[in-house]
Image (tube, grey):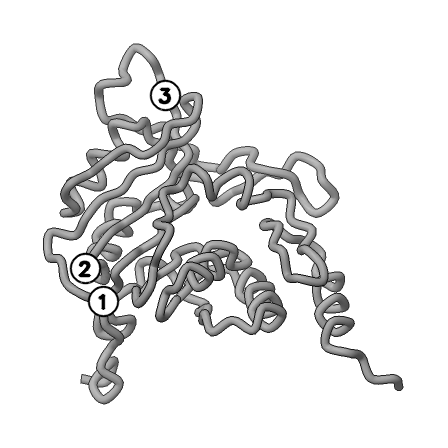
Amino acid sequence: MPQLSFDEWIRSRVEAEHYWFQRIDLGTLSTPGWSDPELEKLPHYGLPDSLIGKRVLDVGCAEGFFSFECERRGAAEVVAIDSFPDSVRRFNICRAALSSRATAYLSNVYDLNPRTFGTFDLVLFYGVLYHLRHPLLALERLLSVCTGTLLLQTAVHEEPTVSSIPMAKFHPRGMQSGPDEQGRPHFDPTVFWLPNRECVRALVECAGFVDIDTLSEDDRISIVLRASSPIQKDGSPPDQKAAPWS
């Protein structure tokens, strides 16, 4: 059997995947994702130009576009988590192609704990809130590991007559969200809550974050917020001698 070059091996791994969410430039090829975050999201999501020396957490990383972008902007360490095994596998294909040091773990936002994950200068929480049964609990877990800044993006649902009241629309059986593997409309059973913007701000404040700023609003369908931890200090990795054993 002829041996594949590294580029050929990467291409074979990319083509073997039946589904890609994010389009990511891997140098010799791009992943065939149906969403192009470099064009659609990066200009609007508030990512700092420089992350030199920062410890970053990317929650709901998917294939890792924002993890790799943070690394490109100088982050000293990038930890990524996703609750889907397929996402972590595809992340690792991209990680190999880009010679990245970012690390993805199969983990849930509710599992976040400073004893096992340490703390972070920057937490990215893009496109996750509306997938959660327990959004306030998730935000509280984020606060437990954030000692710097939270960047949050979520889909929203606005009713003009109650826009000033914190409210959310509940989807007990999910809703249509993006195309499936064949490009057809996809029904996503993991979409539960679509808050309005006022509810998003109230949830973030109730969880304990401060200095909440709205960075972007998109035609009543999404919002991007920046918020701070009330305790500001440098992010640090967990104590390997203690976590999670004591």
Label 3 is placed on what type of residue?
Glu
Q: Which mark is residue 158?
A: 3
In this view, the mark in front (3 or 2): 2
Q: Are marks 1 and 2 in contact (CB under 8 Å)?
A: yes
Say if 162 sits above or below 230 in the image.
Answer: above
Q: Residue furthest right?
A: 1
Q: Are marks 1 and 3 in contact (CB under 8 Å)?
A: no
Say if 18 sits above or below 102 in the image.
Answer: above
Count of numbered circles on the image: 3
- What x and y, as percent, mark residue 72? 46, 61
Measured Cα–Cα span from mark 1 to mark 3: 35 Å
- What x and y, as percent, mark residue 25? 63, 56
Q: Which mark is residue 183?
A: none
Q: Residue furthest top?
A: 161
Question: Which residue is more in the foreground, 153 or 133?
Answer: 153
**Which element type, helix, strand or loop, lies under badge 3?**
loop
Mark before the other along the chain sequence, 3 or 2: 2
**Which element type, helix, strand or loop, lies under badge 1?**
loop
Q: Which residue is mark 2?
A: 147
Q: Which residue is mark 1?
A: 235
Measured Cα–Cα span from mark 1 to mark 2: 6 Å
Label 2 is placed on what type of residue?
Thr
Label 1 is placed on what type of residue?
Gly
Say if 197 sits above or below 9 in the image.
Answer: above
**Which element type, helix, strand or loop, lies under badge 2?**
strand
Dividing the picture into quadrants, the one containing residue 77 is bottom left
Mark before the other along the chain sequence, 1 or 2: 2
